[in-house]
Structure formats: structure tokens, C-alpha cells
Amino acid sequence: MSTPLEPTGGIDTAETIENAIELREVEGLSQGQIVRRRFFRHRGAIIGLVVLALVAILAYTSIGAFGIPGWWKWDYFTPNDVQNSGTPTLSMPVWLGGNGFAIGDHPFGQDEIGRDIFARVMKGTQTSLDVMVVISLLAAVIGMVIGAVAGYFRGGIDQFLMRFTDLFITFPVIVIGAVLGKFAGQAGAFWLAVALGAISWTTLARLVRGEFLTLREREFVDAAKVAGASSTRIIRKHMIPNAMGVIIVNTTLLASQAVLLETALSYLGFGIKSPDVSLGTMISEYQSAFSTRPWLFWWPGLFIILIALSVNFIGDGLRDAFDPRQKRVPSERKMNRAARAGATTEPEQATS
Amino acid sequence: MSTLTPDGSQDPRQPVVPEDDGPILEVENLNVSFFVDGEWFPAAIDVSYHVDAGEVLAIVGESGSGKTQSSMSLLGLLPVNGRSTGSAKLKGKELVGLKGAALRRVRGREIAVIFQEPMTAMNPVYTIGFQIVETIRSHFDMSPKDARARAIELLTMVEIPEPERRFDAFPHQLSGGQRQRAMIAQALACEPQLLVADEPTTALDVTVQGEILKLMRDLRERVNAGVVLITHDMGVVADMADRIVVMQHGRIVESGTADQIFNHAQHPYTQQLLESVPHFGTASVAEGEERTARDRAALEAETRAPILVAENLVLEYPKRGNQPVFRAVDDVSLRIGRGEVVGLVGESGSGKTTIGRAAMGLLPVAGGTLEVAGVQMQTAKPKDLRPLRDRVGIVFQDPGSSLNPRLPIGESIGEPLYLHRKMRGKELSTEIEKLLDSVHLQRGFRNRYPHELSGGQRQRVGIARALALQPDLLVADEPTSALDVSVQAKVLDLFQELQREQGFACLFISHDLGVVEILASRIAVMYMGKIVELGDTDSIVHRPQHEYTQRLVSAVPVPDPAEQRRRREARDALIAQAGVS
């Protein structure tokens, strides 16, 4: 063997970097930065993020939250005089076919006893967002722990935990939610969310377990074992960060399901109870008024769709960002433009 | 076009005379580039070559040199963000820019591809017969019955035993070598004029590789097709190629006949490439003898107990669902002295990696005894393994998988120190820097992530981590099999240097006898879970006793066309004797 070694400690330029082309996109970035960059290039996800942020800001600042008053003049429970039979005063700008943009006194209208629907929708949105966050966080934590333990230790523990999960899966969520919600609903939205979170972790647990089963066969886990790392350290330091993609993506998708679940339960009358307001209870309360006062129905419905859709878009964006196989196909036009621009410089770049 | 027959004798057209007008394939100024991050990044630049009928052109280069992409662009098999410009003419017909039906007529019919990994290149839900018939019927108007007969004819031609029965076999029911044969049969189904073989033997064991190369050589004489052989293995090139094109960084740096390239290489890169190929059978003659003598002397002077003692060791993989217990290692006895490098050679599935993992305490011992660094592994509790982990290290096969992608490599290297020596902060970071220096990596690399490194750099990180605790025993599990030859040469040099400096004992596991020959003073040959031969490097390489060792030794390709021809004849005789696997 007479291969000349490169100078000791010197810069390794002689070596061909065989993945040079793939590396161009990720040079100098950590995994987290790569994911963030891909996420921010995902148009749908960014629109979803902006819409969700706007909805949240509107909901929390307008009528206030956590004891802090908001800027909106009505609250969601005091009946007022019904003006103009409660028709919404919001009118669209001319270019949208309305007669000039105006907000008016009750932009979303009033119900039959004169409560301001805007305030009520905002309150309902708050409830839905709170419930969504609590359900998804709780479900994420339970699912992650159960999935991680089952996937890492395998054997008897795995069998037990997975049969336990199967048991939970066999219960129809809506029925369990109804029973639990009946009790928890009395205690307020928070406890309802806790109850729902406690039953919706099953999918995540199975996904995390699957991810762990593949990760534990990876050599870096063996390497950590040989280095003397304990099981807790391996799970915490080596495996969970690598399973984070699955966890984040599915928690997001779970969140949009949670909104719909809470709405459905409240609509059935098992979820949020009066005087609390949620978008689901509003729809259920006002469904009889659908033909006479459709705005009582449309506004909460619109906000349910906005929240669920934007969360779903964010989830899609996260999934694409975490999945290295999901490469965006560059558009024909962009490629052609770069080809024309680069036609002269290409040979020079090649030598690098 | 000639009619293929199971035995060439009935072929109406006698051995191939390239009487045709000009070359089959003419490639001129072919450029392939990829659209990455807003600009076009070239993968192949101004590639020009030609292939004549009945000729094998080898394209040689390291990964990333553009050899695969330039060939795949002939068939329009580039990813969506790739494009090719320039000219590639198949018998005067332009291939670049071909689309749709015209491209489909060329694919399979006129150009066929043999892929690297037959398991992934064949569809697992269809029988191999179905897949061959599919290829035939998509190009020829043929009844299913005739197509079946033709497929069986092809399977006979590629020497698959019991072709009638194998016709209905699924890919997973065949061995790796048979799968590759089936894929060759599929590629030849339409009697293509050009055959692109992309690393056709890389995924195979060396003895199977020998058989496939023999088949390809036989077929080449029978089928009048040009062959483009893409490979990084100089031994395979020496075995097969008529002419050679060497690529580096997307450009052709040298081209010529096999003799010109191997014996009178002009370009420094070609020379470097040839030098870095382990030349089997020579390493142990020159420096090797001296080293063996030195090792032996050192070993005799050594009074301490051996670092690893295995007596009648049995290792098993436990029953899983319907799969019964699998005995991977059966009745193995092996002894590694302090500071000794022992090579463990065998094919995939022979149980060599299993032994390495058991020595690390990653697998329970099912029978016999195994003592590593004074710890009895068969009775060891997790508690007893802790001191052991202080004294052993392992370098894994795949450097891409053995580093945690979410940790900067400094942290990966420092983990053993953090856990065992309880080092923190400043102390830890000086130590990490020392380790990076020792494997010739810049200190700045400690904050990089594994995906930013090349394969060779990653493997050096793996070595640094394994040596962090200055172990007495290092298990190196195929540390270079995922690397290019020139990178492999550097890593092996580094490895030897570190071994001399630190004097650790090493169990070097590899399927490549050429590599083991360079490093080890003794070699153990494993076959089907048993050690069939154990001896000095010199005697294993030059005077193999066991029949399997003889086959293994004869199958190692040597990067020298003349010598390889001699070895090949000896090997073919052995294959004929033993029959195909």
C-alpha cells in the first residue's frame, strides 16, 4: 500500500465528497434548521400558520381572556336589545358585491335574546383552541411515553402495552367521549379536554412504537449501548429526537381532529355545557334557527372550518418538512431560467 | 439480431464479428446536471465515449463521479430535477431528449439495464417468470405460451437450475446470485443491442460474484451486444473490460484499453485509484512477512491472558413469531491475544458480525464460553457489562447509520468519555479535539452533523468514538465496505497507524480478503456459522487448505488483467467442480 496520506491534520480536500450534490442544499445546517427551512418554503403551511395566528389573536384580544378585558364592547353572555331582528351589520366592500365596508354594532348579528354573536363566536373559538391544545399535548405525551417504552423494551412490556392500546382503540371515541364528557363537561372545558386527551393517544402510541422498532435496529443505538449509555439516556437523547418528526406531525394532525371531536361532542350535548360557549354548542343551540337566522349557524361553522383546515395545512407542511424523501419538484419555468442564466458559468462551477 | 439458444452451438450466426457499420453507442459531449437550490449543478461534463458490438466498456470512478447518472441519462432515467444535454446516438439514433412512446420502444428492447440490487430491482409480488414475460410481451407480439417458452429458454441460458420450476418462483425465494441471474435473463429478454450493467456484482458475495462474472463473460460471447459496465471495483474491471473510461468529478480523465489503463496509466488520478486497490496476494509477501514475524514475536513476549477467548461458542437469534430459533454461530473457538489483529472473513450470513456483536455484549451467549477482557459473557449481568464497555470499542459497517443524525459529531465522539470518565465541559472538549486530531479531522468538525460529512469522514468519526476510551479490544465490523477504494485506502492506513500507536487488539471483520490480508496477522474463515480454517495470514492466502477457503481465495478479483485471467481459469475450474450455488 503506497497511498499518500494527506498531510496530518490538514484540510481534507483531496477526498471526493460523494454526496456533494445532496449536500449543497444542507451545507452548514443542523437537522432542525433544514426542517425549518423546508417548512417555511411550504406555501400551504405558511398560509395555515398565518390564518391560525390571526384567528387566535382575534379571539383572545377581542373579548379578552384569563381575566384581562378585550377591546370588543360586548360580552358573550349579556342579553341586549335586539336591533333590526339581529341581522349582521357587517357589510362587504363594494368589490366583493356589498355596499361599502362597515362593521357596525353587531357585525355577526345577534341571537333571539340579543347576545352579540361576534363575542360568542370569539369565546367559542377560544374554547376550541384551548381544548385543542390540551387534548393534543396530553395525547402526545401519553402516546410518546407508551410508544417509546413498548418499542424500546419490546417483549412482555410491549405485548401488554399494545394490547392495552388495542383495548382503547376498540372503544368508539364518540361513545367514550360522551360518557366521560358527561362528567367532565360539568367541571368545565379544561377537564373535558383532559378526558378526551386521555383516550385519543392510541394512534400516536402505535406510530411512535413503530418508529422506535426501526430506530433500535440502527447502529447508533448499538453504539450508544457500547458507550455505556443507560436505557433512559438512549431513549431520551438518541431515540426521541429522531422520532420527533413522527411525533410533531401526528400531534398536529391529532389537533385538528380534536377540534372536530370537541365540536361533535358539544353538538350532541355531551361536551361543553352552558354557560360555557363552544363553537359546537352554538351550532347545536341555533340549529332550529337555521332558516330564520342563518348567521347564528354560519359564523361558528366558518370558524370551525378555518381552524381545522389551517391546522391540517400546518400538519401537511410539517410532514413534508420532516420527510427527506419529499423533495419539491422545481417548476419547469424556474429550471429553464436557471439553465439560460447558468449556461455560461456552468463549466467553471464544475471544477469546484 | 441473432436467435438466442440455450447452448450457443445451434446459433446460426457464428461468433461475433463486429462487421457492423461503426459503434453501437456513440456518446458525445454528454452533460448531466441537477437543479438544486436554484441553480444547475453539473454531475457529468462533456462525457464522450463509444461502445462497439460485443465489447465491454467499463466506466470506473468513485461514488459521486457521475458514472451512474451519465449512463442512466441514456435511458431517460434521471430524476425530475435532472436534465441531460449533448448527444448520445444508439446506432445513429439520438437518445438525448427522447420522450414517451419512442423512449419506451428503446427501453428494454434496445437498451437493457442490470441493476445493482436484484432484490429491490425486481418486483416482490410477481414471479420472476411473470416479470420476464412482461418484458418480452411489451415489445413483441407473442402469445403467453410462446413467451413462457422463451422465458424458460432465457432462464436456462443464465444457468438457473430447474428453470421450469424457478419460472414460478418469487424473487425472495431465490438466492442473491440466482436473483441476479434472473435479472440478467430479463435484461436479455429482447436481445438488446446495448446492456448497461450498474455495479452488477457489488451486492453479491465474492464467490457468487465470480460465478456471475463468468456467466456474463460467457453470454457476451454469445450475444452480440455492447456492454457498459459501471463499477468501482478494479478487480471486476480487470476481469471483464476491453476498454476503460475513468471518471472523476463528472469528467472523463482517462480512457484506453484495459492494458493501457492497468499497465500504463497516465493521469495521476488513475494511478492513485489503482494504487489504492488492495492487491490480493501481494501484501503479505513484502511488508506482511516482516509484520507477521514482528507480531509473532510480540505475541510470544506477551504474558498477559488473551483479551478474547471463545470456546465452543454458540450464538442464536431467539424465536420470533413463526420463525424458529436461528443458530447463527455454531461451535466456534477463537482466541485473540493482546495487541493482535485477527481477521474474520466470510460471506454474508456466515455469522461473522454476530460474533462481533456478542463480543460487545450486544447479544446473549447461547452455549459454550466467551470471555472478553476478563468478563465471562455467558453469565454476565448488565451490571457486569459496564466495566467491559470501558475496555472495548466497536466500529460499525455503515458510517451513515452508526452516528446519531441529530447530534453534532463532537457529542457523538464524546459520549463514552461523558458516561465513563464523567468528563464535562473544558476537559471533555480538549479530549474530543485530541481524538479528532488523531483521526486527521479538523477540530471545527466537532460542531457539524453527520449528514454534512462524506462517507470516509464519517467512518473516521466512528473510529474516533470507538477509540475514545483507549480500548484493549476493538471490533471493526466491515469498517470500509461502504467506502470507495481510495477512501478505503486512507481509512486503512489510518487504522494501521492508530493500531501501531495504541496497540489495541482487534477483531477485523470483513468479506474482503484483500483488506484483511493487509491488516491481520491471523485470519479465521467462517462458513455457515463455523470457522472452517484458522491460520497465519500468509498460509491462508497462499496455501488455503479447506475447500471453501480455496474457493474464496480464488474468487477474489485482482486488479491486473493478465493475472486475473490466470486466476479466472483456476476459479472456473473450481466452480465447475463444485457446481453453482
Image: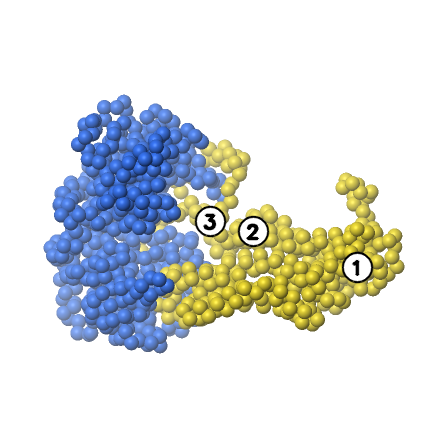
Q: Nearer the viewer, mark 3 or mark 1?
A: 3
Tag shown at residue A325: 3
Q: Chain of mark 2?
A: A
Whether B258 is drawn above or below A22: the answer is above
Q: Which chain is blue?
A: B
Tag shown at residue A19: none
Question: Within 10 angstroms of label 2, few (less than 14), some, or many (20 or more) residues?
Answer: many
Q: Going from the N terminus, do you reach mark 2 or mark 3 first?
A: 2
Q: Is residue A281 visible?
A: yes
Percent of width and height locating residue A217: 38, 61
Q: Going from the N terminus, do you reach mark 1 or mark 2 first?
A: 1
Q: Secondary structure at mark 3?
A: loop
Which residue in the structure is indicated by mark 2?
Answer: A317
Write the residue at 64% across / 58% down.
A260
In this view, the residue in front, A130 or B474, is A130
In this view, the residue in front, A219 or B324, is B324
